[in-house]
Image: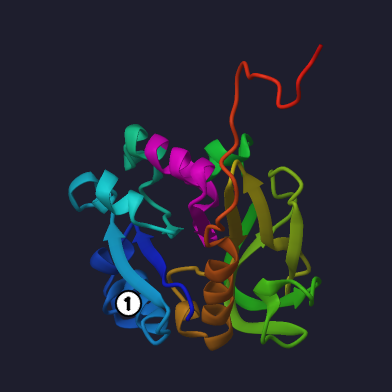
Amino acid sequence: MAKTIRVTIWNEYRHEKTSPEIAKIYPEGMHGAIAKYLKTRPDIQVRTATLDEPEHSLTDAVLNSTDVLTWWGHMAHEEVRDDIVEKVYNRVIQGMGLIVLHSAHFSKIFRKLMGTTCDLKWREIGENERIWVIEPGHPIAEGLGEYIDIEHAEMYGERFDIPAPDTLVFVSWFKGGEVFRSGCCFHRGKGKIFYFRPGHESYPIYHHPQVLKVIENAIRWAAPTNGPTPSFGNTKPIEKIS
């Protein structure tokens, strides 16, 4: 019997409430669109959380019962409380998976985990993005073709100021000529992190079936494993030393 993966989908949820055009694309928020898809998977248990709820809906009880957290933010990164960022960071180190989506590259939690600016080039003119699978044997690429085409997207371009990923699964090409490392895997402590580039709020990207499939695959990859808990500090020898 498959183990249930407990997923919390966190969304800043500001654009959808302030822009009628974006609300038409995501009437239940971007978190709602992702949740609707994931709820069709019987082994994934979904809850949503947003910035303006008490404690950003990331209480100790929620975090301690979350196997994988997805994170989308854009216009209010600095409004995320530092103490909650610290709690999320500690949970990742302890083994909780984290899926960082699109403009959340500038989130406090991603920058803390990367230790860099996480800055990049960008342009918004609705150009075509082609996401190439460069690690076809990776679990996050399961069920995909050689590439994913997104008709209209915001461009992100290199240099992306992040540490070298442990595994680079996707590289994006844009009609304007830029390329971007758009699917990046990292390990921090016992936790696994996946950065996935698509997801600008002005386009229906979280209705794209292949984008949603990648998010599902990433959640399954990032879910905690039942490995040993490392110990630190002064320790007694395992063998007898004479």
Quadrant position of residue 9? bottom left
**Is 100 colored magenta in this rendering?**
yes
Q: Which residues are magenta?
A: 86-109
Residue 186 in sight: yes
Quadrant position of residue 36? bottom left
Residue positioned 46% across, 73% down in the render? 3
Tell me: 188 left or right of 169: left
- Residue 214 horizontal/vertical position (percent): 59, 76
- Residue 88 horizontal/vertical position (percent): 41, 43
Q: Secondary structure at mark 1?
A: helix
Is residue 136 placed above or below 179 in the rendered structure?
below
Kind of residue sitting beneath label 1: Glu
Magenta stretch, main secondary structure class: helix
- Residue 221 horizontal/vertical position (percent): 60, 66
Residue positioned 60% across, 58% down in the render? 195
Residue marked by disc 1: 21
Query: Which residue occupies the extreme left position in the image?
Result: 54
Residue positioned 51% across, 55% down in the render? 98
Is residue 33 placed above or below 187 in the rendered structure?
below
